[in-house]
Amino acid sequence: MPELPDVEGFRSVFESCATGQAVCRVEVRDTGVLHGISARGLSDALKGQRFATPERRGKWLLARTDDGPTLVVHFGMTGRFVCAEPEDPKETYDRVLFGLDSGNELRYRDQRKLKGLWLAHDEAAVERVLGPLGPDAMAVGRDEFEAALTSRRGQLKPALTDQSVVAGLGNLLADEILWQARIRPDRQTRDLSQADRRRLYTEMRSTLRRAMKAGNVPTRDSWLTGHRDDPDPVCPRCGNPLRRSRLNGRTAVWCPHDQT
């Protein structure tokens, strides 16, 4: 599942390809990625509109137009944007193509079609699509982050991956941030000290900055992510075996020796 760094990469592709460009043509090759809008409706609403700089909200992308609706995108597991030229061969999974007045073509490519595209005609409609979404994990302030955790009950990792608490963290990022902060994923949020919460916030920001530079959650040898899928994974910091646990139906990978 794409997480915040992946979505930031997709946002950058969109920005470099389409920001300031008017939509000349919308070609929907598969309506299975459209939600609450028909192919004709999408085309009629966007043709002639000029895209503003896209925004990221956690795992969502908001592509506003200068004086029209907002294209709202969730990439599911396999969605992404590709900037192409019209003569470039179309791939099987190119679901929606936006022809731009620059001559470029912005393509929404998605193999599994688990999410896709919405169209919101005003800010209230944008919020309805997004649902109860917390602040973007890279934009949230320390005090707001600490307050959100303090108000939660239950285990820490499920709280971090709850998009209504903070938006953009998924399974990989949550495990990596907790490992970097040396905190167990099954700690109760109410048991965290202020020092724990502040360390967690600092490591979240640091991990996100480094992952955003890579465009994903990198599988570095010095990171937990670089070893979580090894046959017999060991902690890259202390060399002890990593543990796999189930928390709220999701796998958590962590180091019982380092994360206390």
Image (cartoon, helix red, strand yellow):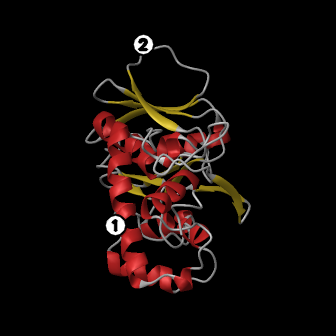
Question: Label 2, on which residue?
Answer: 87
Question: Label 1, on which residue?
Answer: 202
Please state the horizontal and vertical placement of residue 184, each as a whole percent of the image. 56, 67
Q: Residue at x 32, y 74 (%)?
A: 141
Cα separation between marks 1 and 2 = 46 Å
Q: Is residue 241 left or right of residue 237?
A: right
Asked if 104 appears above or below 138 in the picture, the reply is: above
Q: Quadrant of residue 162?
A: bottom right
187 and 140: which is toward the camera: 187
* Amino acid bearing label 1: Thr
Q: Residue at x 43, y 39 (%)?
A: 220
Q: Residue at x 45, y 84 (%)?
A: 193
43 and 258: which is toward the camera: 258
Q: In this rendering, does residue 24 appear at all?
A: yes
Please state the horizontal and vertical placement of residue 15, each as a whole percent of the image. 31, 41
Mark 1 falls on what kind of element?
A: helix
259 and 71: which is toward the camera: 259
* Amino acid bearing label 2: Glu
35 and 206: which is toward the camera: 206
Q: In this rendering, does residue 22 appear at all?
A: no
